[in-house]
């Protein structure tokens, strides 16, 4: 027989999901109002920018983004069509490819950040004291570390 969560744990779970959904929707609205692409584009561009000139293999980006392969593939297709990333043959594996951020992609990511930052502050920061934000960061960090397990 499996253990059942307490009502407190169920409420915490529900509120975590609802808070994430509401905060993300707020960020998406802010980006859209500024005429910018969705948040997922920012996340892809950020991961590729962090990878520098080496780029990332699709499976590496998939792991970093926590997206299903089919969703990521279509997302990359759209970002590539807009000129913000490009695919190059992988030198280590002739069958594969790496995804590289373009200069235009770097510029777009930098353009998106101020809007994203203000949206984070509006959706979360202004509602929490520094002490509350630190406590939330610690609790969520512990949860992420436990769920991610050893690497």
Image (cartoon, helix red, strand yellow):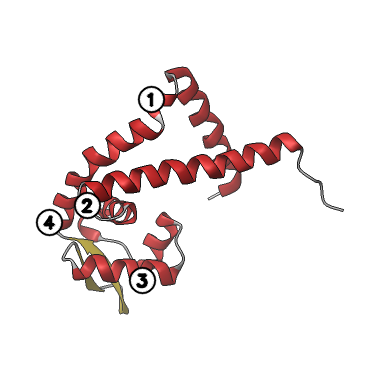
For the residue labelled by badge 4, is the local secondary structure a helix, a strand or a loop? helix
Query: Distance from label 4 to label 1 (Cα)?
Result: 33 Å
Q: Relative to residue 49, is residue 15 depicted above or below?
A: above
- The first of marks 4 and 1 along the sequence is 4
> Which residue is at the front of the view, 43 or 117?
117
Q: Distance between the residues labelled 2 and 4?
A: 17 Å
Q: Would you name the residue on which mark 2 appears?
A: 36
Q: Name the residue under label 3.
A: 73
Give the quadrant of residue 119.
top left
* x, y percent for residue 8: 71, 34
In this view, the mark in front (2 or 3):
2
Residue at image location 18% in from the left, 56% down from the top: 105
Q: Quadrant of residue 65?
A: bottom left
Q: Are marks 2 and 3 in contact (CB under 8 Å)?
A: no
Q: Which mark is residue 126?
A: 1
Residue picked out by circle 4: 103
Distance between mark 1 and mark 3 Cα atoms: 36 Å
Q: In this view, does 104 lie to the left or right of 145?
A: left
Instruction: Identify the secondary structure beneath mark 2.
Output: loop
């Amino acid at each position: 027989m499996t253990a059942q969560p307490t009502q407190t744990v169920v409420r915490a779970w529900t509120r975590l999901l609802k808070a994430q959904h509401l905060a993300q929707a707020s960020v998406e609205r802010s980006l859209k109002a500024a005429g910018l692409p969705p948040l997922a584009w920012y996340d892809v561009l950020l991961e590729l920018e962090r990878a520098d000139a080496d780029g990332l293999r699709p499976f590496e980006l998939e792991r970093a983004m926590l997206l299903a392969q089919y969703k990521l593939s279509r997302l990359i297709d759209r970002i590539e069509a807009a000129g913000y990333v490009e695919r190059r043959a992988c030198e280590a594996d002739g069958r594969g490819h790496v995804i590289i951020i373009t200069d235009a992609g770097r510029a777009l990511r930098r353009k998106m950040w101020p809007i994203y930052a203000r949206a984070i502050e509006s959706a979360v920061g202004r509602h929490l004291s520094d002490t509350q934000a630190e406590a939330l960061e610690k609790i969520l960090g512990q949860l992420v570390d436990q769920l991610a397990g050893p690497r």
